[in-house]
Amino acid sequence: MAGFRTLGIAAAAGLLASGLSAAVAPSGGVHAAPPMKTSAAPGVSPTKGHLHRGVMPVFGTGRGATKPAAAAAPVAPPRAHLSYYGGSVVSTIRVVQVLYGQPSTTVKYESEVQDVATSPSVGTFYGAIASSSYVDSMSEYNTTGSPQGTSGTNQTITRGGFDSQNIIAPSQPNNPFAPGNTTHTIDDTQIQAELKVQIAAHTLPAPARDGAGKLTTLYATYFPISVHITLHVSSGTEKSGVDFCAYHGTTSAPEAYYSVLPDFTTGGMATGCGGGTEFQNVMSVSSHEFAEVITDPEVGLATGAVGSPLAWYDVNNGENGDICNGINASVVGHDAVAYTVQKLWSNAQNACVTAPATPPPAPPAPFHPHGVGAPQVAVTPDGSTQLVFWSGSDGLLHEAWYTGNWNGPITFPQLGHLTSAPSVAVTRDGSTQLVFWQGPNRHLLEAWYAGSWNGPVDLTAAWGGAGLLASSPSVVPTADGEQLVFWRGIDGHLWEAWYTGRWNGPADFSTLGTLASSPSATITPDGSQQLVFWPGVDNRLTEVWFSGSWHGPVEFANLGLISSTPSVVVTPDGSTQLVFYRSPWGDLLESWYAGSWNGPLDLTSSSFGGKGTLTSSPSATVTPDGSSQLVFWQGPRQTLWESWYAGGAWHGPVDFSAG
């Protein structure tokens, strides 16, 4: 038995509000409910009434009644929900466009309907939506397993495509332009009969099937200008442009899925089937039927009480297109054209949609870095991200970053091998991450990230081999965009190079004393002073500073012995200098300057309960709002540790490598 589901001029069509099936019309085997004459806005289902399966009503009659000139935007009916009744879906839809009649001086089509090779056209429209997120949105209606507790057909809805345009020459009994047919009217029973004849004659390709033997072809059938379509239903005869805009149905013996898209240029089809341009209305209505064929293709074969072969159906509101009737959006095709589509009902999102819900982010992967060298930390100026870099046991640069959860670590083999810990900073405008390190042959190398990684650049080679490194470098970006890089040279002196649009130096500050290890540099927030700390040859904390000229060195004998490169940072308000370093026994020490020097404070023993022995220099920073101090270091067995100061107390330490 053949049947249909129409898209009518009022709004979404559905099954009987009572949940009972419709009567079978005596001619054509059309399965439909009696017409609904209750007024309702597009997309809003009346609480009671008789609606036609597969039919899209015209806005001006049926459920839509008279569409006011300034109608409110349509909305989905409340409590809409598609139930599964055990029928098939279309797994991978393949669209065959059928032109019902050879174009001639009397048989004419809308240009976008006929000229399938142009863009935009009906052909490019189907190609776009069939291979887009529009189809993905219907994947929630897969029939694998037992959807909603009903045994399914084991089908998965995936993207499909547009196969071809086929023009048929209807036989005289089914030709709306046959002699004597002065009104150019054709009934659904004739359309079904002609489609079966054309398939049998191979004018139309045979219906394709998926691996489970289920049909995948939709014969989207378009009619010439001035052709009228009728449907014989139990309550009488309904007409295109008067009662409906379009419909989809199912033939039997052989079974095939088809949709009927009448002429959109005349009468009620021009005024009652959408508020866009002619082609926008064609696309919206076509997408409505396209989607309903995917989720409820055998609606035309449903002849009894609600149940199989219906697939996804709401007995009060119809199919997935009906519920959202008149609610349009767009899908952009590969040709960059925005094609109008009607939104579709999603049970999962409880809304009319054109794409599946964005999945929740996957839970963060366990963060357990191993083989960690001396870490170096920086925070982006907006405070959103903590960046931690280190040289791994493989000699390569590694990075992890924190944005509410830890990400990474990732490795950058393209940047080559490091022979020191890296030095890390972010430019004051947040646009660029800077990483410097000692590379092979004691050269200073730089890489930077500004949307993608760049480098490495061998700066020492550019300087003719001057200023060979004997330590890790220390980089400081200034507020005006300069970059200052300090290091210990092979002569034990402090060296500097600086970037002001081009590189300057390197300069050997031979008068500033001898360094026992790498320096640590920073700059005050107002830019007035550059501060550089290092351990002296007697393992005492030593400082020099630049404020128009260099001062120092000053050795702080009262601040204890130091057995690592210090890490210096200034609070954002400029009030305090914080210096962290490793004690000879592996504890984390802090000294700070706030008008006078304080400390050292042994944080490991006083705040960490003896946990978190350091096996590297620490690396410290302060968040841009000044609320938190962050300190990272390498622990035993090349593990990554952190402690942080916030709310007036120290927290941690945390061993990220544990587990």
Image (tube, rainbow, N blue to C red):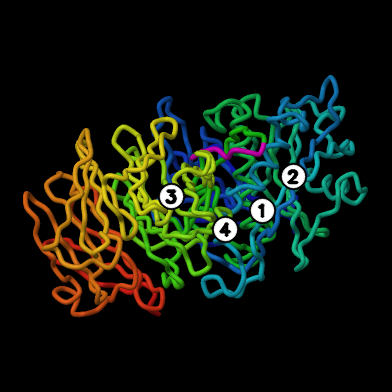
Residue position for label 1: 159
Residue position for label 3: 435
Place residue 213 in its image quadrant: bottom right
Most extreme residue toward the left, as rendered? 595
Residue position for label 4: 413
Q: Is residue 454 magenta?
A: no
Q: Tell me whether circle 3 and circle 4 mark residues in contact (CB < 8 Å).
A: no
Nearer-N-terminus badge (4/1): 1
Q: How much space separates mark 4 and mark 2, taking CA atoms?
A: 44 Å
- In which quadrant is the N terminus drawn? bottom right
**In the visual, does 486 lie left or right of 544?**
right
What SS does tag 4 mark? strand
The residue type indicated by label 1 comes to Arg
Q: Range of the magenta residues?
A: 327-334
Which label number is shown at residue 162?
Answer: 2
Query: Does residue 598 lie above or below 527 as drawn?
Result: below
Query: Does residue 382 lie above or below 650 as drawn?
Result: above
Mark 1 residue crowding within 10 angstroms, few (<14) / some (14–19) / many (20+): some
**In the visual, does 591 lie left or right of 296?**
left
Q: Tell me whether circle 1 and circle 2 mark residues in contact (CB < 8 Å).
A: no
